[in-house]
Image (tube, helix red, strand yellow):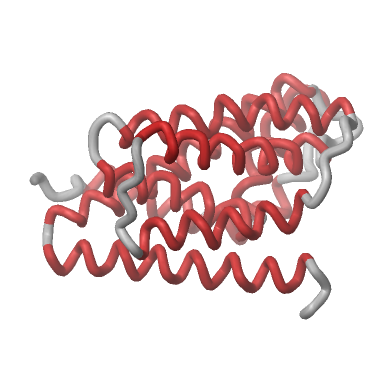
Amino acid sequence: MKRLRPNATALVAFLFAAIPLAPAFAHTGTGVSLGLLSGFMHPLSGADHLVAMVAVGLWGAQLGNPAIWVLPVTFPLVMAVGGLLGVLGVPLPAVEPVIAVSGIALGLMVALSARPPLWVAAVMVGVFAIFHGYAHGRELPEAADAVAYAVGFVGATGLLHLSGILIGVLVGWEAGARVVRACGAAIGCVGVYFLLAAVGVIE
């Protein structure tokens, strides 16, 4: 298996370097520009969203073809539907707890190198995507263009999936596979933190 090329590694580095700047950029501009930028930065500014989306890419890379592309395509497509529900204000219960659970569940799948049937993995990813999309939709800035906002958060989600896939190719090496599983365990721990916060156990 080929090693990551420098430009791929640079993409991952840039993506994570941009995270601290997300809150500042997410509230600038108007109309289309505000929508695109806010949508793009929203998944990057919340660790609960970020780790789950990276986990989708990691898990897809572990599972190999066709999951390596089915899961990262399923998530943003279904997430866009969830975003529409959020924009429309359709009631959806337990959004934050389910988002936290997505980090736990997806992280656990990666940590255990779980290999369920493809349809099970796709349904699991799709269900969680609805809640992530809904949360994005509910955060649509008042002056922002909704379509541009959706394009932004779907695009950012795709890049986070890609970063997970690029890290996930390490499974081709024994030591790399352990690193990927450790990333899954770390993601699960982040999910536990957000779940405890969502139910009010910690602040």
Question: Quadrant where the C terminus lies?
Answer: bottom right
Q: Residue at x 77, y 34 (%)?
A: 137
Task: Answer left or right for 145 relative to 131.
Answer: right
Say which quarter of the image contains residue 132. top right
Say which quarter of the image contains residue 7. top left
Q: Is residue 115 above or below residue 192?
A: above
Residue 45: image location, x then y, percent: 65, 54
Task: Answer left or right for 23 relative to 69.
Answer: right
Residue 127: image location, x then y, percent: 60, 38
Q: Residue at x 19, y 48 (%)?
A: 4
Residue 27: image location, x then y, percent: 79, 44
Q: In the displayed image of the protein, which residue is found farthest to the left?
A: 1
Q: Is residue 150 above or below residue 18?
A: above
Q: Residue at x 8, y 46 (%)?
A: 1
Residue 92: image location, x then y, percent: 82, 40
Q: In the displayed image of the protein, which residue is found farthest to the bottom?
A: 202
